[in-house]
Image: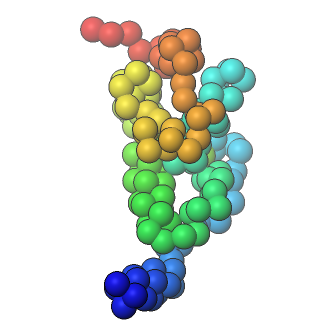
Amino acid sequence: MKRNLLILLIVFIVMQFIRPDKEDVVVDKNLEIKAPLEVMNILKTSCYDCHSNEVKYPWYSSIAPFSWVISTHISEGKKALNFSTWENYSPEKKDEKIKAIYRTAYASMPLPSYLYLHEDANLTKEQRSMIRDWTGVRPK
């Protein structure tokens, strides 16, 4: 039993040396998405940690294996949509992204795993409706 615990402890310590990069990207506010203040506040509270270059890394993001999961979520989130580089998207891409925001406002975002430790990011029905209304997308 002691030996197994010692092995687990050593593995855990070694894991801490495998660190994902925490990007420190300069944010150009001219490229950021533009939305009414209420919508921007919702996006910043509930979306920006995975979908922008303005990530606020929590203390546990430095502890493996959490750091690996968080890094992966952020990387995938930015690939899907980055509010900090919105103006770099083509008009077609912006239209595609707006439609995705419309769909995910009710369906899947923010992720339940994120909400577990960020209760303030949980969107109310009214906030979800506000985001959908802001997108201007009309269901077919």
Q: Residue 114 location in percent, x, y?
A: 49, 44
Q: Is residue 37 left or right of residue 123?
A: right
- Residue 89 to residue 72: above or below: above
Q: Residue 54 location in percent, x, y?
A: 65, 51
Q: Which residue is at the front of the view, 94 or 126?
A: 126
Q: Residue at x 48, y 54 (%)?
A: 74
Q: Which residue is at the front of the view, 18 or 97?
A: 18
Q: Which residue is at the front of the view, 127 or 133?
A: 127
Residue that sits furthest to the left in the current view: 140
**Residue 83 in view (yes/no):** no
Residue that sits furthest to the front in the current view: 1
Q: Total label count?
A: 0
- Residue 40 to residue 8: above or below: above
**Residue 119 in view (yes/no):** yes
Which quadrant does the C terminus fall into?
A: top left
In the picture, residue 41 is in which quadrant?
top right
- Residue 82 to residue 38: above or below: below
Q: Residue at x 58, y 69 (%)?
A: 62
Q: Residue at x 48, y 58 (%)?
A: 70
Which quadrant does the N terminus fall into?
A: bottom left
In the picture, residue 11 is in which quadrant?
bottom left
Q: Residue 16 location in percent, x, y?
A: 51, 80
- Residue 82 to residue 41: above or below: below
Q: Residue at x 36, y 91 (%)?
A: 3
Q: Is residue 36 left or right of residue 83?
A: right
Q: Residue 122 location in percent, x, y?
A: 54, 29
Question: Colour scheme of this structure image?
Answer: rainbow
Q: Which residue is at the front of the view, 77 or 134?
A: 77
